[in-house]
């Protein structure tokens, strides 16, 4: 039931992402298509509009007694001017909205197309589209005649745009077809992208569920032990403390373990939410490492272990002192936990590629090759029985990785040739 509910939520979220992606693609393709169409339309009609405006300028600047457009071979000032486009037709209207130059237009053309054509004065001095007999598209420019000595009141320049209109119609059909194909392809792309977008969400969901489950288990164990021991002591209220020393000591041990667990959980929770801010300052690398390692040298000697230092990084680095100390403690604690008598633990520092390099190695039980990719996962324990006995909860290396990442560095682990493990950390100066 829980798995079905989870899958239902994932499918719903994926569908939401898919719809959003599809809408985005559709809007982009639509805007792109409209821009292309408007640019093609503008390009097609720019030439015709220039022709209409040029003819209008010539006619307006004509002498009152000559409103004709002379051919290009006429002598005079028009000799070098470009001739009128043969597609342009000049129609002259009187005050009664009647055509007065039927002979110039041609009787046959007038009878077939212009006899029922009505003059529209609403778009005076503006280039406009019209259909003659609702069949043939024209583009025209209507303006008032400047000559007051004739019966002409308005002059209309018309140019047939059949070719341009056919190009636009074919282009619009092609554009619609391509847009439809693109939208169909965007459905597939939206589905693919939604699946890609869901992968990190599903991964985070699973990691969070695993984290909560593991944290609940880790919290439940010490609480159960403490509860059982306290209830056991309540059954014998008159017993002396000395007789219950073992129960009290175990309860205190589990309380300390519980306190450490909650502290580690809080650290990781703040790290995930980016609430924890580093307070960096300049630290002398070798001096700081030396001071942190000093108590561990004594602990190692008491356990018949060899602890060696090889510090060759006599320089300053910018780091959070508290977190850097915590990082070293985590790695040194692990080294002590997983080494036995006569094993060795070593700390080495040096500079490489303008970075501070810190290596902590040991000759202990080591880590299996197949488990190395998982050691930084939260609550991961290679040997659960052993780590529980030694107090480990599988969060230390996760915190160490976060501290290194927060400083902009890297941490890697590798098995030694003989035995044990080496942690190699690179930090910026």
Image: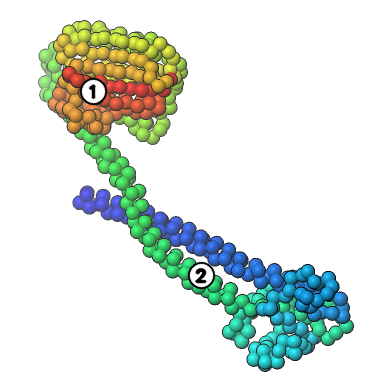
Q: Is residue 360 left or right of residue 18?
A: left
Is residue 203 visible in the rendered structure shown here?
A: yes
Check residue 339 in the rendering and tell me which mark sits there, or answer none: none
Badge 2 element:
helix
Give the image's coloring scheme: rainbow
Check residue 171 in the rendering and tell me which mark sits there, or answer none: 2
| Residue under the point 22% across and 49% down | 2
**194 to 383, vertically: above or below:** below
Badge 1 element:
helix
x and y, in percent, of residue 364 in the image? 18, 18
Q: Nearer the viewer, mark 2 or mark 1?
A: 2
Among the 4 quarters of the image, the one containing residue 297: top left
- Are there few (<14), some (14-19), or many (20+) residues within 10 Å of tag 1? some
Among the 4 quarters of the image, the one containing residue 94: bottom right
Q: Is residue 234 left or right of residue 68?
A: left
Query: Gap in Å between the C-alphas at discs 2 and 1?
Result: 75 Å
Q: Nearer the viewer, residue 166 or 71?
A: 71
**146 to 355, vertically: above or below:** below
What residue is disc 1 on?
257
x and y, in percent, of residue 387 in the image? 18, 24
């Amino acid at each position: 039931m829980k798995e079905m509910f989870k899958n239902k939520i994932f499918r719903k979220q994926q569908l939401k992402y898919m719809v959003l992606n599809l809408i985005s693609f559709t809007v982009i393709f639509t805007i792109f298509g409209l821009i292309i169409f408007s640019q093609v339309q503008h390009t097609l009609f720019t030439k015709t509009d220039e022709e209409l405006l040029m003819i209008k300028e010539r006619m307006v600047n004509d002498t009152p007694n000559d409103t004709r457009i002379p051919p290009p071979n006429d002598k005079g000032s028009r000799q070098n001017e470009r001739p009128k486009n043969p597609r342009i037709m000049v129609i002259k209207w009187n005050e009664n909205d009647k055509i007065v130059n039927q002979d110039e237009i041609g009787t046959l053309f007038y009878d077939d197309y212009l006899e029922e054509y009505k003059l529209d004065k609403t778009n005076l001095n503006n280039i406009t589209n019209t259909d003659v007999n609702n069949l043939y598209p024209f583009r025209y420019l209507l303006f008032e005649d400047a000559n007051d000595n004739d019966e002409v009141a308005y002059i209309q320049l018309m140019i047939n745009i059949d070719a341009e209109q056919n190009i636009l119609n074919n282009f619009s059909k092609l554009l619609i077809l391509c847009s439809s194909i693109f939208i169909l392809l965007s459905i597939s792309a939206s589905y693919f992208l939604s699946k890609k977008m869901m992968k990190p969400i599903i991964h985070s969901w699973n990691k969070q569920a695993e984290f909560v489950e593991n944290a609940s288990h880790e919290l439940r164990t010490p609480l159960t032990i403490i509860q059982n021991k306290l209830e056991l002591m309540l059954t014998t209220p008159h017993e002396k403390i000395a007789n219950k020393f073992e129960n009290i000591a175990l309860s205190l041990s589990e309380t300390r373990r519980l306190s450490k667990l909650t502290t580690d959980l809080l650290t990781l929770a703040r790290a995930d939410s980016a609430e924890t801010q580093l307070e960096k300052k300049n630290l002398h690398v070798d001096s700081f490492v030396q001071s942190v390692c000093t108590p561990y040298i004594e602990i190692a000697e008491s356990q018949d272990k060899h602890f060696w230092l090889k510090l060759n990084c006599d320089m300053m680095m910018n780091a959070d002192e508290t977190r850097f100390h915590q990082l070293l403690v985590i790695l040194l604690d692990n080294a002590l936990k997983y080494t036995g008598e006569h094993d060795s633990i070593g700390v080495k520092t040096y500079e490489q590629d303008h970075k501070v390099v810190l290596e902590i190695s040991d000759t202990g039980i080591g880590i299996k090759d197949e488990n190395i990719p998982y050691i930084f996962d939260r609550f991961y324990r290679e040997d659960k029985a052993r780590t529980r006995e030694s107090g480990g909860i599988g969060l230390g290396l996760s915190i160490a990785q976060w501290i290194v990442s927060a400083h902009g560095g890297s941490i890697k682990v590798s098995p030694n040739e003989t035995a044990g493990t080496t942690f190699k950390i690179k930090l910026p100066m």
